Image (cartoon, rainbow, N blue to C red):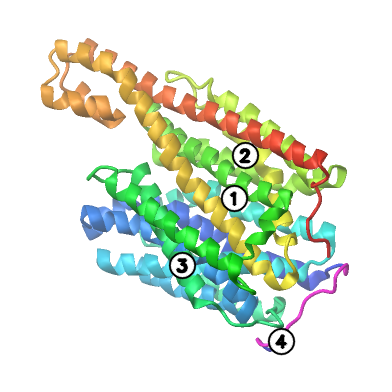
Amino acid sequence: MSATTTETAPAGDRAGQRAWLGLALLALPTLLVGLDMNVLFLALPMLTADLQPSGTEQLWITDSYGFMTAGFVITMGILGDRIGRRRLLLIGAAGFGAASVLAALSTGATMLIAARLLLGLAGAALMPSTLALITSMFAEGRQRGRAISIWATCNFTSAAVGPVLGGFLLQHFWWGSVFLVAAPVMVVVLVAGPMLLPEYRTPDRGRLDLVSVVLSMAAVLPIVYGIKQLAVPEGGGPALPVAAIMVGAGVGALFVRRQLRLATPLLDLRLFRNPTFTAVLCALVLAGVAMAGTGLLGTQFLQSVLDLSPTTAALWFAPMGLGVGLGTMLAPTLGRRLPPAAAIAVGLAGSVLGCLLITQVDAGGSPLPLAVGVAVLGLGTGPLFALGIGVVVGAVPAERAGSAASMSETSNFFGGSLGMALLGAAGAGLYQQRMAGPVADATSAGLPAGAAGPARETLAGAVGAADQLPDRAAADLLRAAHDAFTGGLHVAGVAGAVIFAGLAVWFLRVHCRGGGRSPHPR
């Protein structure tokens, strides 16, 4: 099949064996893009010891992938609609494989940063292409719902599989192995893609508005940078990240104004007039807030409070990703009994229960309550990710599916970044408030003045301060620090319960007003 042909299933036709084989192929890059975002944190200590990056270089190694993905995913979604979704997927696969080899063989921090930038750019090309191709391959409603559920399962279970796979590779091989594993998989995509995947591009492509492309990236990148800096401060205070967010928001306002004036906008913002479409995208952001904030504090709780190794902590937290995967697989069955908005509301009500279970975690207890809580939380979000994303891509004609896919990806990414910043800051603030008294008591017991500040600021600072105290005073300080940090995790659980309860009510209202079906029937 030529790369320039246009082929899609007629509306209502059932997909055959070739489409399901193509879906299996699309699952590979979907899994790998998610894996690449999760395994680096485990590899960071080993590669830092080997490459000796500075503090700034280490920040770029961890963040450059996310920056590039966030900045380019909207542009890549529209670009795939115009030049061909399969073509863009294969370009992204080739770039991802080559950049993975470059990252694995990096001999210095600069080389690794460059590789991570290329990986982020390739990842931005892969993600909307996979989802948009699914809409081309599966025209019949039930089949498309099942296919999107499988895609969502691969997308979110990678968060559970990534740390486990990374831990295994790092135990037996060098740090570059966590990157190198992607190369042979991308070769399979490049070889089988032209045989199994159809090509689709917009028949009347029109002119790509380059000003809108620049504005979209100039809006997204400063906001993502600012949020990440607020979530994990690197010194210098909040002035610069807040200014970056304000600049990004200002450019975003210009982007919105331009889209509303263009005859063929880069993103059709008029879709937000549909209540279900709006509810889904807002829910993706807010669910990302709750899940990322819980993930940030939950994984730190397992390692810093319960003193588990990174690999063991990853295994205990894996139920969140596995729960999302199971929820997305069960979503089509629920969707056959209820309209999408009602099914999403039922799932989100279950996530409220999961968040409430997280508030029962004890600093001196077992990790089991946390594992159960995040599993139930993840299970409840399954209908949102499976049925909700189906609503988003169903809200537009087939020729703009890549654009819709990029909007769902961007919403979830923003939610994750916001969650780490907002709930991470809330947890840190509660910790500092609760540690004022215990640190004062420790100071009376002989804690040096220079250690009091770090002990009041972070749990790691309290651990270091305890080494400078008599045994009983050290035990008291550590107990207080563990309890204070666990209180921050409880705050994340309460915040998540409020978020999911509010979203469940919102979707019930959408359902009762008759907005619970796909806004763009085909």
Other residues around mark 1 within 10 Å, as few (<14) / some (14–19) / many (≥20): many
Front residue of 170/121: it is: 121
Mark 3 touches mark 1? (CB < 8 Å): no
Say whether disc 3 or disc 4 marks the residue closer to the N-terminus.
4
Mark 1 touches mark 2? (CB < 8 Å): yes
Give the residue drawn at x 32%, y 65%.
Answer: 113
Instruction: From the top left corner, tell me how far across and down residue 403 is, in percent.
Output: 62, 67
Give the residue drawn at x 71%, y 66%.
Answer: 134
Give the residue drawn at x 81%, y 41%.
Answer: 513
> How far is mark 2 from mark 4, CA to CA?
40 Å
Frontmost of labels 4 and 1 is: 4
- Amino acid type indicated by mark 2: Gly
Residue 96 visible to an observer of this rendering? no
Q: Quadrant of the N terminus?
A: bottom right
Mark 2 touches mark 4? (CB < 8 Å): no
Say whether disc 3 or disc 2 marks the residue closer to the N-terminus.
3
Say whether disc 1 or disc 2 marks the residue closer to the N-terminus.
1
Mark 4 touches mark 1? (CB < 8 Å): no
Task: State the mark number for residue 378.
Answer: 2
Task: State the mark number for residue 481.
Answer: none
